Image: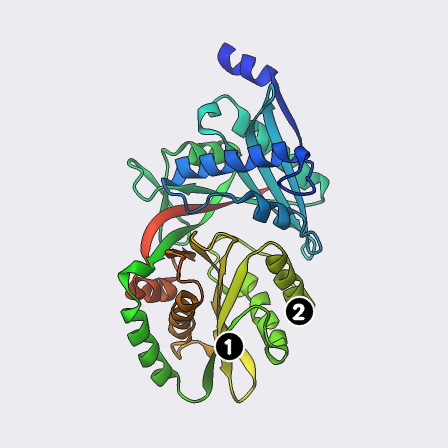
Amino acid sequence: MSPTTGSLLAGLRIDALRLPSSVDAPEAADLLAAARVMTDALRHDTGTTLFDAEPAEWLAGLRATRYVDRRVRLARLEDRVVGVLELDVPLDGERSANAGFHVAPDARGAGIEDALIEEAERLARDAGRSVLYTWNLTTIDVPGERLPSPAGIGSVPLEADSTRRLLRHGYTLGQVERVSTFEFAASLTRAERMLETALAAAGPEYRPVWWPSPAADELVDGYAYAVGRMATDVPSGELDWEPEAWDAERIRYRERLKADAGQLMAVAAVVHEPTGAVAAFNELVIGRDRSRPTQNYGTLVLPEHRGHRLGTIVKCLGLIRWHELVPTSPRVMTFNAEENRFMLDVNEAVGFAPAAASGEWKKEL
């Protein structure tokens, strides 16, 4: 450890974020400072504003603890917040926890990142978890040597500080995801043509539906079942996600949280008429500021219904109806595993373009 590093770490303190009553409350200073660190860090790492933290929405998410134990730790140098650790411990799992690390760009390289990683591992062990998952976002054009995904497709930049740090701490790369964006200004003509063709190919057994939350009572059980399949039925490379238990009550809980936070969510789905099952779905979400980018949450075609162009239907229908609902949002952002060639083919055909890359990592504790 260099003298400079030692002097910086001597003044480093890590403590828990105390949640304020609101972002306007006097005690909200730490939450606001943490949100700024997260925003600055992700802008630096990705070269985009796609991941800017909105404090009120973040606060609402931190309070959503019925199904996950959420913990936030702040790294401080003197009185300045310079780092943020987010740790989620799913309550319907037994083995795993998920961590995100954010350090202000001008405070990096002094050991703060290492201290946060060590804190995350300690908290995960204390919660009885044996596997810690994390990620590192980068731009799509970092030069130099690449570390290939064990899934066989995709890579992360070996020269990125975050890559080298995770390797040094014993993490292994499990998968690479592509972050893509669709610009509404580029027209929905292709989406309209693709939807028409896909509907004809699917045939009368498959009925498209779309709704802004809440889901209709007659669909909520099937929708919940399909959402629960996300953890086990999407391509996951060398990652071993634990199953998630979703039912109508959990869907309603999430819908209320979104509404209370001022977020808007809409779902495009396909119903299999002979059984009534929700065979495929795509979720789009935006925050209070309707001029910000839209986030694509889950997209899934259940394995037993694949081969009928349902992925194209929910993707295209979702984009078309969303733009009617929220014409002020300029773009949609989505994540896809690089080995998920089917959905990447759909996204590329409709007009999505790469915007960033995400390495998905794990460590056995």
Which quadrant of the rendered structure holds the C terminus? top right
> Which residue position holds label 1?
279
Task: Give the Cα distance between marks 1 and 2.
Answer: 16 Å
Q: Nearer the viewer, residue 322 or 133?
A: 322
Residue 62 badge: none
Residue 247 badge: 2
Q: Residue at x 53, y 61 (%)?
A: 264
**Residue 201 falls in image quadrant:** bottom left
Q: Is disc 1 surrounded by few (<14), some (14 to 19) or many (20+) residues within 10 Å?
A: many
- Residue 168 visible (yes or no): yes
What is the x, y in percent for residue 259? 60, 60
177 up-or-down from 72: above or below: below
Q: Residue at x 46, y 88 (%)?
A: 205
Q: Is disc 2 surrounded by few (<14), some (14 to 19) or many (20+) residues within 10 Å?
A: some
What is the x, y in percent for residue 257? 64, 57
Residue reaching furthest to the top: 3
Q: Residue at x 50, y 59 (%)?
A: 285
Question: Which three-letter amino acid code belongs to the residue tagged 1?
Answer: Ala
What is the x, y in percent for residue 77? 58, 21
Q: Are marks 1 and 2 in contact (CB under 8 Å)?
A: no
Question: Which three-letter amino acid code belongs to the residue tagged 2?
Answer: Asp
**Residue 345 falls in image quadrant:** bottom left
- Residue 2 visible (yes or no): no
